[in-house]
Image: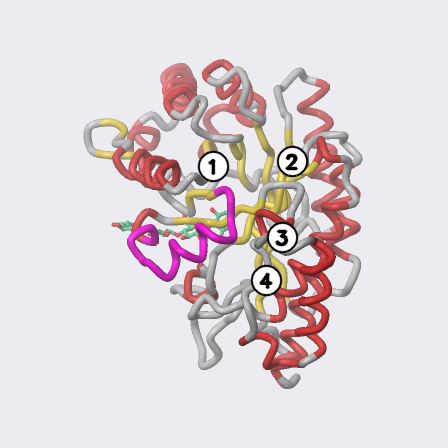
Amino acid sequence: MRLSRRGALASALALAACGRQAAAGPEPGPLKSLARFPIGVAAMTGQFDDLGWSELVRRQFGRVTPEWEMKTEALAGPGGYDFQRPDSLVSRAEAMGLKVHGHTLVWYAETSREFERLDGQKQAYAEAYRAYVTTVAGRYRGKVTGWDAVNEPLSDDGALRDCRWRRNLGDGYIRLAFLHAREADPAAPLFLNDYDLETRPAKRAAFLRLAEGLLKAGAPLTGVGTQTHVNAALEPGAIKAAVADLASLGLPVHVSEFDVSVKVGQLAALRAEGLEQRQAALAAETVEAVMRLPQRQRYGITLWGARDRDSWLRRPPEDRGLIRDRPLLFDDNGRPKAAARAFAGALS
Ligand code: G3I
C-alpha cells in the first residue's frame, strides 16, 4: 500500500512529536518515492555485499555516486588504467536498478604515476590529459546520469588551487576537462563541484565567477554541485542561501555530498537531542532548498553515505577522539533518525 504524501507527512509529524523514540518507528519514505528529484547515496563496491547496506539503499535511494572507484587513484594501474573497480561498481548498481553519478574526472587531490612522469612536458601532458578524460568519460557514456567533471577547483579563499593539473596545463585545465568530457560523452550533464559554499561567501562568489567565466568561454558546463558537508552548528538559512545563489546561473544544481557532522566543538556539550534536532532541521532545510528550484534545476540530493557507520567521517583520518560521528539520515543499524523523518517530511 503506497502511503500518500499527506499520509507520510502526517505519520512523520506524529512520530516526531513522540520525541526520540520516533527513531525506532517505521521507516519513513521511501525517500526516492517521496521526492520529485533523485535521491542519491555515496557507494563503494564492497558495500553491495553488505545486506544491511544494500537493502536500505534499495529501498530508499535511486542513484549512487562512487565514493572512490572512478577517481584517478582507483583507475591507475601499473600498465595504464584498470577499470575493474568502476566497472564492478557500475554493474552492481545497475543490477540493483540504481543510476550512477560519475565522480570525478579531474580533482586536485588525485593524480597517477603516468601523469607524474610527464610533469613539465607540456605537449605530452596535454595529450595524456585529453586521453584520460575522453577514455574515462567515453567508457561510461550512457551509464552515468552526469559527471563531476572538475572537483574542488578553489581554495578556501576562493583562489584557484595550485595543483599538478594547473601547473602543467595552466588555468585552462578546467575548461579543457569540460571540453574533453563533452567530446567523449555528448549528453551527460557536466558539473563543477566544490565544498564550503555555505560557509565561505568569498569562495561561493569565486565559484560563481569561475562558472560564469567557463560558460562565457564556451565550456560545456551544464551543472553545479555544492557538496554540503556541514555540521550541526551551521546557522539556519545558510544552505538555502547557497543553493539559491548557485541556482542563479540557471543550471541544474546538485547537493552532491550531503552530511551533517554532530562532532562540533562548543556544541558537543549540548544534549544529544539538541544536536539531533539541529541535524534534522538542516536536513529539512536542504530538501526545501532544492524543492524551491524549478524542476529542470533539481539534479538531486546525494547523501555522502547510507548509514552513520558508512560515513567517511567514521574512517581515519577524520574519525578520531572519543565521540563517533553520526552525520547521516540512518543510524549504524540502518534505522531512521530524526534527520530521516525531517528529510522525508520536507519531501512530502
Ligand atoms: O579500499 C582501497 C584499497 O583497496 C586500496 O589498496 C587503498 C590504496 O590507497 O585505498 C583504499 O581506498 C580508500 C578509499 O577511500 C576506499 O575506502 C582510499 O585509500 C581513500 O583515500 C579513499 O578516501 C576517499 C576520499 O574521498 C579520497 O578519495 C573517501 O572514501 C571519500 O569519502 C572521500 O570523498 C571526498 C569526495 O571525493 C570529494 N569531497 C570530499 C569527500 C570527503 O573527503
Please name the residue that numbered disc 2 is placed on: 224
C-alpha span from label 1 to label 3: 21 Å
Quarter of image, res 346: bottom right
C-alpha span from label 2 to label 3: 12 Å
Query: What kind of element bears circle 3?
Result: loop
Give whichever of discs 4 and 2 has the lower sequence position: 4
Q: Which mark is residue 333?
A: none
* 262 drawn magenta: no
Please name the residue that numbered disc 3 is placed on: 228
Residue 205 vs 238, above or below: the answer is above
Name the residue type under label 1: Lys
Residue bounds of the magenta highlight: 47-63
Position of residue 72 measured from the top left corner of the image (x, y, whole percent): 37, 36
Name the residue type under label 4: Pro
Query: In the image, what residue occupies the spot 44% across and 22% down?
Result: 141
Q: Quadrant of the C terminus?
A: bottom right
Please name the residue that numbered disc 4 is placed on: 28
Count residues near mark 2 (Cα–Cα under 10 Å), then give few for <14, some for 14-19, many for 20+: many
Query: What kind of element bears circle 1?
Result: strand
